Image (cartoon, helix red, strand yellow):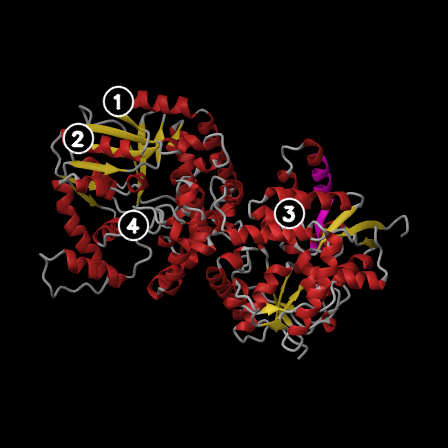
Amino acid sequence: MKLNAHNFKENAKKALKDNDLQASLQKLGTGFPLKRLAAMERLPEFEDLRDQARDIKDHTLRHLDFYLEQFESRVVETGGKVHWARDIKDGRKIVYEICEAVGAKTITKGKSMIGEEMAINEYLEEKGLIPIETDLGEYIIQLRNEPPSHIIAPAIHLRKSHVEEAFRKTHTELPKDRNLDAPEDLLVEARTMLRKKFIAADVGITGANFMVAETGSTVIVTNEGNGDLTQTLPRIHIVLCSIEKVVPTLEDCTTLLRVLARSATGQEQSVYTTFSTGPRGETDPDGPDEFHVVILDNGRSRMLGHDTHDMLRCIRCSACINHCPVYQSVGGHAYGSIYPGPMGSVLTPALYGLEKSCDLPNASTMCGKCEEVCPVRIPIPKMLRSWRKKQWEDGPVPTMQRLAMTWWAWWALRPKLYHRVAGWKMRIMGFMGRKSGHIKAFPLKNGWTENRDFPAPEGKTFQQRWSEKGGRRT
Amino acid sequence: MSENEKNVGLFVTCLVDLFRPTVAFAAVKLMEDAGCSICVPERQTCCGQPAYNSGDNEDAKAMAQMVIEEFEQFDYVVAPSGSCAAMIRVHYPELFADCPDWLTRAQNLSTKTYELLTFLSDVLHVDKVEAALDRTATYHDSCSGLRELGIKQQPRKLLDSVEGLELVEAEQAERCCGFGGTFCLKFSDISSRITDDKCDDLLKTGAQTVLGGDLGCLMNIAGRMTRRGETVEVRHIAEVLADMCDEVPPISQGKG
């Protein structure tokens, strides 16, 4: 998708007024978090597992070059091929060339955030190919021609009526008077339409939740089984993933899987967990003839060893997103990036540049809920703060904000003057709000009184009263 | 000051100093009752958190240095706010991570700095107070205090000893109120949407009084409540524990 993060404020304003969206968000805000909590309570060792998960990722990131090379050798040994993509352009070209070499026409696609990052569908369409999303949520938003609004529930912003509308508009070969009232009707229709596509596809593209270095396997977790049909039916299987997805061993992978689904949807395990190792072997009953893994960097190696290094631990569970009060208020599209919410506000500036996404690191109350729920204990607020610091040092801070902060600091560093002036100011404000206890508006428009009353001060400051009382001083 | 008394420096916090001095007097009373001698350095304003969270580390450092210089002389430093106490306890050492001289002083101050309720409960082992309030109340857990300092049971335990007070838990007591310091000014619409959710959740309890330990959050909640025409009272917990509710009307409300 085209980055639209610089319009965060306007996007958010619109989102707050969108009643359909607000109804969807209301459900999300209670749904996933409560399910996660219940899953945690059923697993006493959950907190220990989080430590282990963090340590596995930390270890892997420290030896990333080693594990990536080990992964590549194993893939080659099992008959597959690894392609290294420095950036999005590289990645798209690699995918297209693989498709072109086999004369592919239609391509089925399982859910892949790296695919979204590469905007691979748009690119393949430009080249005359037909990519078809097979994850139900992704299929719906593909029909509606819009980006995902959540990393694991891409169509979470939509209501059932939106889905029906999209299906009626696209599936014109079906009878017009068919009944699509029940959610099951929609499911059955999507299933019927997609089944034909699965069988016709020349190439299947999936993402990968993990790459296992010791076996050369890639791993996906899905709830619909679409990933399996995408990768086993066509002749060619392309896996899209990024450098930080590698883990050393199958054992490590299972530890991470234990925290992944629980943190995401509150499931013990996703319905399908699929390990793919190489193309179809001589004794295999099915599988693709070719197995390609495209490993994208796109700015991630620049994060290694820097302020946002820990973000590379992320396993894309979306717990931070599901629990974020800002995301719960404005939804994913407002962020203008395929990675929304707290994790996105750290990642988007790293991948696309801070100057194009200045608002994102600031669009957080710093409540810390994201860090509290992160299965790999990423200190997200700390990293948001590090972006803010960079922003402050390198310039892209609105002039009024910079002035206001510098002005405040100037006063705060001159206690004597500060206390004298504050004393007068509080007396005036106290007088203004003497009856109601608050002030409705100030002469100059400000963010506080737009939406709240400003509680009036008592009158004299504590420092004044403490002096008058003769309280102990240094 | 007698030899047995703990020498406590009160970090008033800018909001309490300017808007709600009663909270500081309540804090003084609670600590004096528990055998502390309270000193209030005049050379104090802000802990530097707004600058730190805005990425302005230079100004944050300058403010932190002033706090360190002024407060390192005490046995304990106490603030009636989880977020300001967390700034000193958790973030001052981070701020001076690459400045060894100041780092030692910041760490030293960090270990003896407490938020009021944790100081009363965990250090002074106060488990009951002499106070009465005939009300049902609900307690909002402010984010910094809860997640950075682990303040959860302490306020509830102390409130339990207030005569006549009935505490009812909100379903989402731990959810952010939308204040977020400068966030509420920069993203006023989003902030007020989050605050509305908070207000709804608090009102759902049917409590007559909303209590909390951070004035920033409480001013935000109270300001939104009165803007919405709600009559629920919002107060800092210290006012209740020190039995000083008669001295000042609820936040954002008139004398009535």
Q: Distance between the residues labelled 2 and 4?
A: 37 Å
Q: Position of residue A295 (x, y in %)?
A: 31, 30
Viewer-nearest of discs 2 and 1? 1
Q: Which amino acid does label 3 sit on?
A: Met
User: Both on one chain, marks 3 and 4?
Assistant: no
Q: Mark 1 lies on which chain?
A: A
Q: Which chain carries label 3?
A: B
Q: Position of residue A171 (x, y in %)?
A: 13, 56
Q: Distance between the residues labelled 1 and 4?
A: 35 Å
Q: In which quarter of the image is the C terminus of chain B?
A: bottom right
Q: Which mark is residue A285?
A: 2
Q: Indicate yes or no whether the magenta region holds residue A344.
A: no
Where does label 4 land, which residue? Answer: A147
- Helix, strand or loop under label 1: loop
Which span is picked out in magenta?
B104-117
Q: Which mark is residue B87?
A: 3
Q: What residue type is labelled 4?
A: Pro
Disc 3 and disc 4 in contact, CB within 8 angstroms: no
Which comes before the other along the chain, label 2 or label 4? 4
Which comes before the other along the chain, label 1 or label 4? 1
Residue A241 location, quadrant: top left
